[in-house]
Image: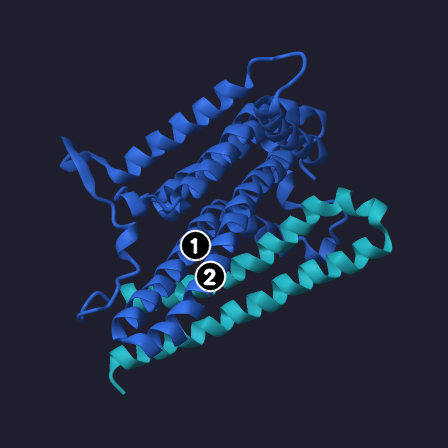
Chain colours: A cyan, B blue
Amino acid sequence: MDAEAAKLIGAGLAAIGAGMAAIGVGTVFGNFLEGALRNPGAADGQQGRLFIGFAAAELLGLLAFVVAMILIFVA
Amino acid sequence: MAEGGGKIDPMHQFEVQTIAEGFTLGGQQIAFTNSAAWMLVTVVVLWLFMLGGMKRALVPGRWQMMVEGFTGFIDNMLKANVGKDGRKYLPYVFSLFMFILFANLLGLLPLGLVGLHPFTFTSHFTVTGVLAVMSFSIVLIVGFWKHGLKFFSLFVPHGTPVWLLPVIPLIEFVSFMVRPFSLGLRLFVAMIAGHILLKVLAGFVINAGNAGLLPGLGVGIPSFALMVGVSALEILVAGIQAYVFALLTSLYINDAEHLH
């Protein structure tokens, strides 16, 4: 296999990371909704924490995207 | 990626182009680029937006309500995350939030239709990195100013067991030093990913339309529908990323103000 093909395969594999981050973000928002529906009164106060969790989960997916971009354009 | 006929280069939109030749400084060309031009546009639009809402009418109109909604939103965020001491950071966090929000939204405008291609300068790490370093240096300056060398106790959280003392400060230190990178990286990658996705889908629409009637209808129309949906998602992401940037900045400021 030549190096160019290996790079593209690697970039494709990095997309798995983006999918995993999708699971993470879904878990964050899903669990927030679950809790918010049980106790709607407390939900508004926790929105900051919701977005902190979202940001942390999303960052890892974005890192996978960066890896793919580096493989295609830089490496 | 740019080779081959009929291929649409999704990275072309991120190229920094020189509008006016500037001067050379230390061997580096300092030019007025499209990035700088759109920063200027963002500042002017933001300035006009704020000017329209700062009339301090007793009965606020719609415009003033909009501006006051934004200021109140950031004020509440600082109050919730930093407490009373957070009030003095309101100008900085508000400017940061509004600048990023307007930059993201202006970059999404379909001005290409009239030949004026918007440039999302938040899709460049040089820009978001500088914003992140600004937030980070405020944290460092405030932290050392207020607490002196006690600021280093940030790396040892309360209630750390003694046998973990060799490990926890190291982990805390790494997570502290990674902050400016993650802060800048998140915004720039989120913007770049959304814009590439839109351009790739646009490429599908155009190439399918050129390929004939059947691919045009079968591929082009679903792609176009997806583009509309992704555009709506991008508007949401533009807001969320600006919010997350301001939120994390206020959290870091809270660390500097109160340690933990």
Residue A13, horizontal then vertical, whole percent: 43, 76
The N terminus of chain B: image quadrant: bottom left
Which residue sits at x=83%, y=49%?
Answer: A40
Q: Can see residue B166?
A: no
* Quadrant of the image occupied by residue B54: top right
Crowding at label 1, few (<14), some or many (≥20) Cα neighbours within 10 Å? many
Residue B149, horizontal then vertical, whole percent: 59, 32
- Comparing B198 with B174, the one in front is B198
* Residue contact between numbered discs 2 and 1, judged by CB atoms under 8 Å: yes
Which residue sits at x=50%, y=20%?
Answer: B52
The C terminus of chain B: image quadrant: top right
Q: Is residue A28 above or below residue B98?
A: below
Residue B47, horizontal then vertical, whole percent: 44, 23
Which residue sits at x=55%, y=20%?
Answer: B53
**Kind of residue indicated by mark 2:** Leu
* Quadrant of the image occupied by residue B214: bottom left
Residue wearing tag 1: B189
Which residue sits at x=18%, y=40%?
Answer: B18
Q: Can see residue B251?
A: yes
Q: Is residue B114 left or right of residue B222?
A: left
- Comparing B35 with B112, the one in front is B112
Q: Are marks 2 and 1 on the same chain?
A: no
- Name of the residue lying farthest toward the bottom: A1
**Kind of residue indicated by mark 1:** Val
Crowding at label 2, few (<14), some or many (≥20) Cα neighbours within 10 Å? some
Q: Is residue B72 left or right of residue B101?
A: right
Helix, strand or loop at mark 1: helix
Task: Using the numbered discs, state the Cα–Cα distance from disc 2 to disc 1 in whole angstroms.
Answer: 8 Å
Q: Is residue A46 above or below residue B216?
A: above
- Comparing B244 with B208, the one in front is B208
- Between tags 2 and 1, which lies in front? 1
Residue wearing tag 2: A63
